[in-house]
Image: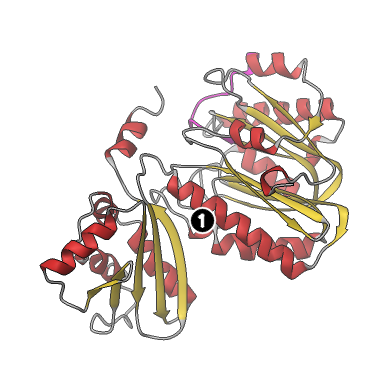
Amino acid sequence: MSDAHLQPKGFSSIIANLGIKDSRDDFMAVVSDVPASVSAMFTQSRFAGPSVTLSRQVAQRHTARGVVVIARNANVATGPEGLANAEEVRAGVARAVGVDAQELVIASTGVIGRQYPMEKIRAFLADVPPLQTADFQRCAAAIMTTDTHTKHAARKVGNASLVGIAKGVGMIEPNMATLLTFFFTDAQIAPPVLDAMFRRVMDKTFNALSIDTDTSTSDSAVILANGLAGEVDLGEFEQALYDIALSLVRMIASDGEGASKALEVQVSGARDDAQAKRVAKAIVNSPLVKTAVHGADPNWGRVAMAIGKCEADQDIDPDKVRIVFGETEAYPRQLDEAGLREVKGYLQGKEVLISVDLNIAQGRFTVYGCDLSEGYIRINADYTT
């Protein structure tokens, strides 16, 4: 069986079109046959939506039965009515699948500041279709907004299977959270072990991702482990979780709104990993760096500028910094015309790697993003219409 079709035991799904915006699927629920260990991380935005508020309460219980997602409406900044609507949606789905509403994580993504179209949703809740064997590919499609393709990955770990899905191409600068991403496994892992592992993996993957420096109000990352396949090697499982998460991150970076190139920034030689991450994020988030990458402009000075913005890091010495595009050193080496042409040719590719060595100590961190194009402006200038 190929990775794409791996099926963790004991998960079922409902996928439907509620008519939020168009005829595409915009609703999905995945439910475990039995209570599952759960770990979750959410946006730190002060404008977090009611779905995040409700789901935080579920995560604090350490076990859950499933997730419910509505796409193309964020249900954020919608006041008491928005909270009541989220509770009604979750309760209606819970009744239909025979679980307690407090056992369901709920997430929503899309336009901010608009109430759910509750007449359409109530019509659906009055006649919810039965659960079917989980179709994770269709679930991945149902949670998309401006994504151009689904984000789905899977691995086998011993006797267990692990599946991850995600959505997100804009408003992405996770802050101890991440857009929407959900992982499902039949491995048996105790809640505290799962939580520590999940946070380690998220910090190195989704928290290392940035498309446009804007933190979503709805970011949610959830993993459910129902234990039906028994115990697994924890080290092997964590590596598989990291591999899947990084695969999803790379898919998101490549599919960033209007993106034509994936951008990876590796910083090494930092005082510590935290400093490396700050410098890497300063580079990957710089509009001038991103537009230079888009236009294949070998203007390495923009990378130097971005490093220099980390003004609180007084131990960064420009005389010790090294900047490399692909395998071509751009600084401190003085690029001649041939060198500039070499970098320009490299930047015309679909994947761009910028490496920076601060030559301070052993700290390192890698971040992921994309270029900035006219397409990003077009998508977001017309987003609500």
Res. 106 image quadrant: top right
Q: Nearer the viewer, residue 100 or 19?
A: 19
User: Which residue is depicted at the point 14% across and 67% down?
Assistant: 338
Query: Which x, y percent locates residue 23?
Result: 56, 17
Is residue 117 one of those drawn in magenta? Answer: yes
Q: Residues within 10 Å of mark 1 (few under 14, many from 20)?
A: many
Span highlighted in magenta in the image: 108-119
Question: Does the image show residue 177?
Answer: no
User: Is residue 98 rendered to the left or right of residue 212?
Assistant: right
What percent of the width, then of the height, locates residue 258?
36, 39
Residue positioned most to the left: 337
Q: Which residue is labeled 1 in the image? A: 175
Q: Residue at x 27, y 82 (%)?
A: 317
Q: Residue furthest front?
A: 1
Residue 318 pos. (x, y %): 24, 80
Give the percent coordinates (x, y) of residue 151.
57, 43
Residue in the foreground of this view, choosing between 16 and 45: 16
> Is 12 placed above or below 355 here?
above
